[in-house]
Amino acid sequence: MKRRLLPFPCLVLLASSVAFGGCAADADDGSAQQEGQIQGGVADTNAAHNYAVGVTNLLGGVCSGTLIAPNLVLTARHCVVPPSDNAIVTCSNIFQANVAPNQMSITTEPNLYKAKSSYGATEIITPDDKAFCGNDIALIILARNVPAKEALPAIPVVQFKLTDKRLSGSITAMGYGITNPSSEDSGQRRVRENIPVLCIPGSSSIDCTGDLGRYTNDPAEFVTQGYVCSGDSGSGAFDQRTFTRGQPYVLGALSRGPQTADKCLAAIYSRTDLHAQLIIQAGMKAATQGAYAPPTWTVPEAPVAAGDPAADPTAAPGEPTSPAPTKAMTTSGCSTSPAGSGSGSGAAIVGLAVAAILAARRRRSS
């Protein structure tokens, strides 16, 4: 069965013979559509998981994200730019300018289309580098704080590396995307646990080499087994061990992934540890705007005594302290689902979502 390269905001990255997708796509015509739930997952209405948020863009697109501070959301960069008519991209493609913050809307509720409340945005923060691969990450500062009784933020991994032994090597995925590439059932938050991390560029034990190298060689990304589809773009990869304990570490934001006509395959995430400075600075700025003490993750960890298994907080034993400095072409795809909203009510989210879905169907039939 032919694989296709599709990004999760409806970009499509073609390289070699593998196709990647987060945008649902028809057969093998090379096009992509904006649609987007976690394949094989279950509907998630657990209020303890409300840090996994829904993200909508007034100009079109359903995405997912992670609340990492009371007024700060981590998501994919392709979720905060205007939709593009050009579905074919490579790692040399560059991002357009971000939409105005008032075009974004975020909800902690488990169903986007039934949400009764949402949060507007005041600022969008993205990397200076506009190249697609390795820079598909964004931070959204909200206009008001999410109350702790509504959602407790997850913790971004910014003070140590993804190769650290404190992490389990598997993740939980949660997002608002479609359940498979041919579905149109985005909008419901879903969860799937115990997804293996396949490779981390530069790791001495699980480097992205051989067959895995076609997914990414970019040091600012990592790859897991699939199960995420369109609309899950921007969703967090939550370390399984800390997720189970109820204090989740988030390792990255979903960028893209390969898919066939009926199955979403591997998932490529933008790493939080390799974007640590950007995330920490956003955390400090969000704390000032939200009038609360900066999150503990913005402060460097205290040194650990020599001989302790965690003595080197930046790398596990035998691992490099940072990924190999390679920047290669990757196969890629994006994952945005059609729908959008500016700040406002849940009803607005629903209306925009329906409008975007109808627009996507028109594009598909044209």
Image (tube, rainbow, N blue to C red):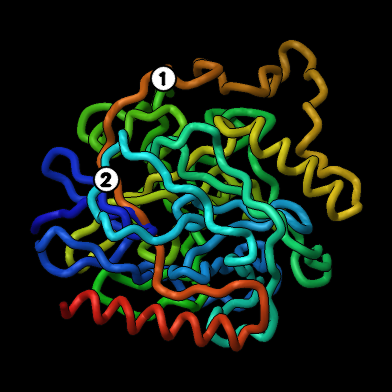
Query: Which residue occupies 40% across, 63% down?
Result: 336
Query: Which residue occupies 38% across, 40% down?
Result: 94
Q: Is residue 47 left or right of residue 187?
A: right
Query: Which residue occupies 25% across, 55% down?
Result: 87
In percent of width and height, residue 199 lies at 38, 35
Total marks placed: 2
Which numbered disc, 1 or 2, marks the residue that appears first in the sequence?
A: 2
Q: Which quadrant of the rendered structure holds the C terminus? A: bottom left
- Vertical comparison of 301 with 256: above or below: above
Q: Amino acid at mark 1?
A: Ser
Tell us which disc is closer to us: 1 or 2.
2
In percent of width and height, residue 102 lies at 64, 65
Judged from this view, the residue extending furthest toward the top is 306
Query: Could you tell me if residue 282 is visible in this image?
Result: yes
In percent of width and height, residue 278 lies at 64, 35
For mark 1, give the secondary structure.
loop
The answer to which of 284 and 59 lies nearer the viewer is: 59
Could you tell me if the residues under marks 1 and 2 are in contact, i.e. CB atoms within 8 Å? Answer: no
The answer to which of 136 and 44 lies nearer the viewer is: 136
Query: Could you tell me if residue 244 is visible in this image?
Result: no
Q: Amino acid at mark 2?
A: Val
Q: Quadrant of residue 300?
A: top right
For mark 2, give the secondary structure.
strand
Q: CA distance from mark 1 to mark 2?
A: 30 Å
Q: Residues within 10 Å of mark 1 (few under 14, many from 20)?
A: some
Disc on res. 204: 1
Q: Which quadrant of the rendered structure holds the N terminus? A: bottom left
- The residue pinned by badge 2 equals 89
- Vertical comparison of 22 with 318: above or below: below
Q: Is residue 183 left or right of residue 316?
A: left
In percent of width and height, residue 53 lies at 61, 66
